[in-house]
Amino acid sequence: LYEAHPWWNLYGSVSQAFRAPTLYDLTSLDSTSVIETPAPDLDAENFVSFEIGAKHESKCWRMNSAVWYTLLDDTIVRSPTGEVIDDTPVVRKDNIGDGWIWGIELEAAYSWNTCWTAFGNLSWSEGKVDQLDPDDNLVSRWVSRNKPFTSLLGIRYERGRFWSQLDWHHSEAEGRLSFRDMGDARRIPPGGTPGWDDFAIRAGYRVGRDSNISLSIENLLNQNYRVHGSGQQEPGLNAILAIEARF
């Protein structure tokens, strides 16, 4: 960490991690969007990540930015076997996933007085990993469920115990598909997931120091959309009344 200025910090990091295979990974005979076969000989996945970024905070501004890069070693990859049972593709699991993923993240907020704040963030990533094609050839393809360019913009008013907020979530279309994604028509439409926009308005009132009541009206344009890889459509125009108490 380096303090370049009283308002600016620069940082860098290197980190290492692993993920042991779960009992589900080892023994699953699940049949959902794909049919998985047991793989009792799986080993742990290993990761090494590098990140650099900057943080800024002043009277009116708050900003963060980061660029990261992750090396993948022996990750568990689900590859189609080419076999189909009752219109559902069969996949196999192997520790063949050597590859990489990198991405960027940016966020900022600007308060031009004590009541009004504009804010936003964006993120994007891409990566490739080794996987088996239906002919059992080892090839480098997009990682499963790549994160598309996603952003949030909003404006918030807050005075006393009352607050209100208007926000806009945006996602680009995602067509960078792994072999697994291409055969997973229940979660990902053919050719990829379309882009979408979601507008919402929210308001709330802090009843006390530890309690809050709020009302949110989401998907104001009543769009039919899904988050990439989620496998389900998001609700249409909807309202949420919430009461929160902390203790």
Image (cartoon, grey):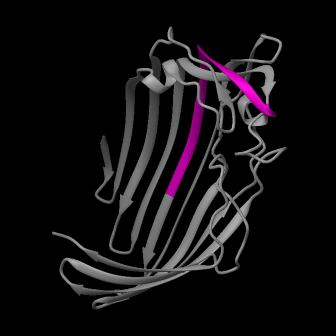
Q: How many numbered marks are there?
A: 0
Q: Is residue 149 left or right of residue 247?
A: right
Residue 186 in sight here: yes
Name the residue furthest top.
41
Residue 184, x across and y down, in percent: 74, 38
In which quadrant of the rendered image does the C terminus lie?
bottom left
Name the residue furthest left.
247
Residue 161, x across and y down, in percent: 28, 89
Q: Residue at x 44, y 44 (%)?
A: 53
Quadrant in which residue 31 is drawn: top right
Compared with 58, 195 (above or below) is: above
Foreground residue, 203 or 5? 203
Foreground residue, 87 or 63? 87
Q: Residue at x 73, y 31 (%)?
A: 178
Is 98 covered by the magenta stretch? yes
Secondary structure character of the magenta stretch overall: strand
Compared with 202, 16 (above or below) is: above
> What span is colored magenta in the figure?
86-106
In which quadrant of the rendered image does the N terminus lie?
top left
Is 122 covered by the magenta stretch? no
Name the residue furthest front.
86
Q: Residue at x 49, y 60 (%)?
A: 107
Compared with 177, 220 (above or below) is: below
Residue 66, x across and y down, in percent: 48, 46
Residue 22 in sight here: no
Residue 225, x across and y down, in percent: 71, 63
